[in-house]
Amino acid sequence: MTKPPLDILLCAPRGFCAGVVRAIDAVEKALAIHGAPVYVRHEIVHNKYVVESLRRKGAVFVRELDEIPDTEAPVIFSAHGVPKSVPEAAAARNFLAIDATCPLVTKVHREAQVHYKRGRRIILIGHAGHPEVVGTMGQLPEGVVTLVETVADVLALEPAEPDNLAFVTQTTLSVDDTQEVVDALKGRFPSIAGPHKEDICYATTNRQGAVKRVAPQVDAMIVVGSPNSSNSQRLREVAEREGCGLVRLILRAEDIDWSLFGNLRSLGVTAGASAPEVLVEEIIDAFAARYAVTVESVSTADESVFFPLPRELREQAAE
Ligand code: 2E7
Ligand code: F3S
């Protein structure tokens, strides 16, 4: 039987960003230098496939440092960043701490600290409970940073000193939603200090840009990524808002519900910043088994960002 035709439009850029490559490399390098086990606080990046592969190589994932026995093994903090209390607790226990926080998140931590030193109260735009938000809020004393998620949250703010505010943002937000929240902040507090636009990173911006181009052209769209991955969830939302009728965020090929994807002429595919390319290939192969596929890359930006390994690892490698 001949297979029906299917045009696959592959978003570019997609998948791993420079911060994810650095964080995964950090765990692998720590394993190579120190041997197993290497402890990792929180999923190094939000992807089960990545976490399971590292677990098989000897990484031990924990939620909090108190799950780790006294040890000389390295303890790595995830790419999403940690509150100040975490490196402090690690130092108190003499852990060999390695900070794999993405440098673009560290930059936001520094911005928040500079605003605080200048006497400002800080508004953080982000999603409650996300580890990056917990980490950024935890750079400063309790009560200094106020979280807002929506325009409604901005309208409900009652700051003690409305002329003495600054804002920072999570790095993986929706570019469009965040613009509205920033506009609302600037409307209510015209003197508010902040970045030129927001703190959304290059990878988040570029992946959303590619989805905006592809989603209106296809019958369905697959975002490869985890449900707990903020940037991947934002890609799913962008595709839905562009009017694509069928959009699914899936971890890997076995999660495809073929009753939904049975009758297509065109399919868009992208991947969140924590999703390995091998899972994109696996999904394209699964479609190729059922359809006569053509694959075309649709590129909306070039990326050449590279971050060197965390300083602690460069020093340990040199020893
Ligand atoms: C760190 C940061 O692991 P992810 O899925 O994380 P998000 O924040 O999107 O849930 O993706 C990589 C990554 C993105 N941002 C890692 Cl701060
Ligand atoms: Fe960093 Fe952005 Fe990736 S904050 S970890 S470059 S998604």
Image (cartoon, grey):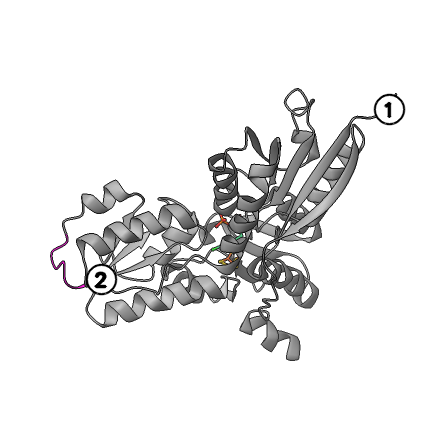
Place of residue 176 in the rendered image (x, y in percent of width and height, measured from the top left)? 40, 47
Residue at the left extreme, as displayed: 160
Magenta: main secondary structure equals: loop
Give the amino acid at mark 2.
Answer: Ile
Q: Is mark 1 within 8 Å of ligand 1?
A: no
Tell me which segment is drawn in magenta.
159-164
Q: Quadrant of residue 106?
A: bottom left
Mark identifier at residue 192: 2
Left or right relative to 111: residue 314: right
Q: Nearer the viewer, residue 104 or 57?
A: 104
Question: Which residue in the protein does label 1 denote?
Answer: 2
Residue at mark 1 to residue at mark 2: CA–CA distance: 62 Å
Q: Quadrant of residue 74?
A: bottom right
Work out whether residue 6 can be spotted. yes
Residue at the bottom extreme, as displayed: 319
Place of residue 290 in the rendered image (x, y in percent of width and height, measured from the top left)? 79, 27
- Judge whether residue 58 is colored magenta: no
